[in-house]
């Protein structure tokens, strides 16, 4: 088994799990994971004739965790609440506040050496 004390497994992340309730009301539950891996890199994306440099994030959590597309990941432990119906507390406000945060657009599970959840997304 891989030693999770290695330097790339030394981050804490906060996971905001998106839930749709009562028809279309959106709420978020918050979870904190320690001993994670978190990296970012720049990537050039081209849409039509426009090119743009964006940040791509990859977080890994030891074990299998329930993460889905449209959830939010933030580097570090944060205790902000998200309320999509209150200015200053919306998910877009949280993403603007924390530059190392992203909306999940890919989740995969690896079980080759260390069971872990791979979470990926683009910065805003």
Image: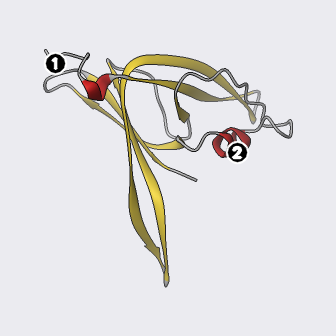
Is 90 in front, or is 97?
97
| Neighbourhood count class around disc 2 (C-alpha, 10 Å): few under 14, some 14–19, many 20 upward | some
Vertically, is 46 above or below 27? below
Is 4 in front, or is 109?
4
**What numbered label is drawn on residue 14?**
none
Q: Determine the image quadrant of residue 63.
A: top left
Going by the image, does 77 lie left or right of 39?
right
Q: Residue at x 73, y 30 (%)?
A: 82
Query: Circles 2 and 1: CB distance less than 8 Å?
Result: no
Q: Secondary structure at mark 2?
A: helix
Q: Position of residue 19 (x, y in %)?
A: 64, 28
Nearer-N-terminus badge (2/1): 1
Q: Position of residue 104 (x, y in %)?
A: 49, 41
Identity of the residue furthest to the right in this view: 86
Quote the CA–CA distance across marks 2 and 1: 36 Å
Q: Secondary structure at mark 1?
A: loop
Viewport quadrant of the N terminus: top left
| Neighbourhood count class around disc 1 (C-alpha, 10 Å): few under 14, some 14–19, many 20 upward | few
Q: Position of residue 60 (x, y in %)?
A: 34, 30
Identity of the residue furthest to the bottom in this view: 49
Q: Residue at x 36, y 24 (%)?
A: 36
Q: Determine the image quadrant of residue 33.
A: top left
Q: Position of residue 67 (x, y in %)?
A: 46, 29
Q: How is the image coloured?
A: secondary structure
Going by the image, does 117 lie left or right of 89?
left
Q: How many marks?
A: 2
Q: Residue at x 73, y 42 (%)?
A: 93
Vertically, is 1 above or below 48? above
Disc 2: which residue: 92
Q: Residue at x 42, y 16 (%)?
A: 34
**What numbered label is drawn on residue 2?**
1
């Amino acid at each position: 088994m891989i030693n999770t004390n290695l330097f790339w497994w030394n981050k804490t992340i906060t996971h905001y799990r998106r839930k749709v309730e009562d028809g279309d009301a959106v709420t978020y539950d918050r979870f904190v994971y320690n001993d994670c891996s978190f990296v970012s890199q720049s990537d050039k994306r081209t849409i039509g004739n426009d090119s743009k440099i964006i940040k791509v994030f990859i977080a890994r959590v030891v074990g299998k965790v329930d993460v889905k597309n449209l959830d939010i990941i933030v580097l570090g432990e944060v205790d902000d609440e998200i309320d999509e119906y209150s200015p200053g507390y919306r998910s877009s406000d949280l993403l603007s506040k924390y530059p190392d945060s992203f909306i999940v657009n890919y989740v995969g599970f690896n079980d080759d050496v260390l069971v872990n959840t791979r979470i990926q997304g683009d910065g805003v």
